């Protein structure tokens, strides 16, 4: 049950701590869009679009909590029921009024969230009889956590640079093609989005490799590509099934949490239990597929 402490504690923080709000920044941006839409001579369609964008930006700013960066759900699979909101804090929001202020707090919370995520996955890995973290004593575990945290940060930076290297030429090419043929440009834009999804899918097991086997960021990227390539259909099936289970349970538990104040706590506990099971299943899936690949290579 102690494996549930981190996800439960994070949800309690998101529920009860004062939210860090970017509503003033979003409101200023929304006002700029509305002023753009009200310029004389603006086509009706463009004016309507700017008004819709302004409303979306304003709504996002009111609901977004910078504290949610503490939860690394996608990268390190920390389960959270309240990471996207759903419950109002009893305390007034801390408003971030400048872009620099918002960026600094987001970076601090993001780095801390990566560290919390590495600790969480490491605690799960210590309970498994497979992998480099199995039955590791607490002193060695603490030193490994710091090294793995730095490798995860390096992994994020490498992936960000990789995406920029792919996206910038693609976006320029799509823009040029769109000038000649809007339909073909739309198709290329869709294809470039699909390419991004494929890249992320092949990186699906990289953080598990860093935590379980103490791999460097580059080695983890290479290993994730190799394992996913050799076990593409099983990995796709596991990803689809775990995503459906996670999203489905979250939707049901959000309904439960919205019924009454006393139902929030059991909903958080149930979500942490199921999410932790899915995270541990990912570690087992990665390790068994890796062992299978190594066995096949030896044979």
Image (spheres, grey):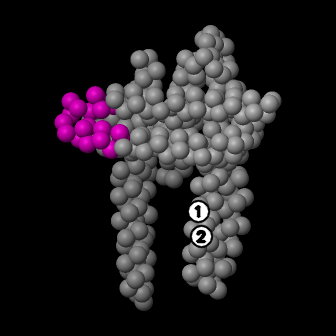
Q: Which residue is nearer to you in this view: 161 or 28? A: 161
Q: Position of residue 187 (x, y in %)?
A: 58, 74
The correct choice, above or below, for 95 with respect to 282 in the image is below
Q: Quadrant of residue 174?
A: bottom right
Q: Position of residue 205 (x, y in %)?
A: 63, 38
Q: Residue at x 64, y 76 (%)?
A: 175
Judge from the rendering whether residue 99 lies leftward or rightward of residue 287; answer left or right: left
Q: Position of residue 211 (x, y in %)?
A: 64, 28
Give the number of callouts. Answer: 2
Region rendered in magenta: 249-268
Can residue 297 be seen from the camera position used here? Answer: yes
Q: Secondary structure at mark 2?
A: helix
Q: Which residue is nearer to you in this view: 107 or 204? A: 204
Judge from the rendering whether residue 19 lies leftward or rightward of residue 155; answer left or right: left
**Residue position marked by numbered label 2 in the rendering:** 189
Q: CA distance from mark 2 to mark 1?
A: 6 Å
Assess disc 1: are there few (<14), some (14-19) or many (≥20) residues with their C-alpha within 10 Å of its C-alpha.
few
Assess disc 2: are there few (<14), some (14-19) or many (≥20) residues with their C-alpha within 10 Å of its C-alpha.
some
Disc 2 + disc 1, Cβ < 8 Å: yes
Quadrant position of the C terminus in the picture? top right
Q: Residue at x 56, y 46 (%)?
A: 236
Q: Quadrant of residue 112?
A: top right
**Residue position marked by numbered label 1 in the rendering:** 193
Q: Going by the picture, which residue comes out furthest to the front?
A: 299
């Amino acid at each position: 049950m102690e494996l549930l402490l981190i996800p439960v504690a994070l949800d309690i923080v998101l529920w009860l701590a004062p939210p860090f709000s970017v509503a003033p920044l979003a409101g200023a941006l929304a006002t700029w869009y509305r002023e753009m839409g009200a310029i004389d001579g603006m086509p009706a369609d463009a004016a309507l679009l700017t008004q819709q964008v302004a409303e979306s930006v304003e709504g996002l700013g009111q609901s977004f909590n910078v504290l949610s960066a503490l939860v690394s759900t996608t990268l390190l699979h920390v389960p959270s029921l309240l990471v996207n909101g759903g419950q109002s804090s009893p305390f007034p929001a801390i408003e971030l009024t400048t872009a620099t202020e918002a960026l600094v707090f987001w970076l601090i919370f993001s780095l801390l969230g990566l560290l919390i995520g590495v600790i969480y996955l490491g605690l799960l890995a210590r309970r498994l009889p497979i992998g480099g973290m199995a039955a590791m004593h607490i002193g060695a575990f603490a030193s490994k956590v710091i090294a793995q945290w730095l490798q995860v940060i390096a992994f994020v930076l490498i992936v960000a640079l990789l995406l920029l290297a792919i996206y910038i030429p693609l976006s320029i090419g799509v823009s040029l093609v769109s000038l000649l043929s809007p339909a073909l440009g739309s198709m290329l834009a869709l294809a470039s989005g699909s390419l991004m999804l494929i890249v992320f899918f092949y990186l699906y097991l990289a953080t598990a490799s860093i935590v379980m086997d103490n791999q460097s960021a580059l080695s983890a990227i290479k290993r994730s590509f190799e394992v996913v390539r050799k076990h593409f259909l099983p990995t796709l099936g596991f990803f689809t099934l775990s995503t459906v289970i996670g999203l489905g349970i979250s939707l049901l538990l959000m309904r439960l949490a919205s019924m009454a104040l006393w139902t929030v706590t059991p909903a958080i506990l149930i979500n942490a239990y199921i999410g932790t099971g899915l995270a541990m299943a990912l570690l087992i899936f990665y390790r068994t597929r890796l062992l299978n690949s190594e066995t096949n290579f030896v044979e």
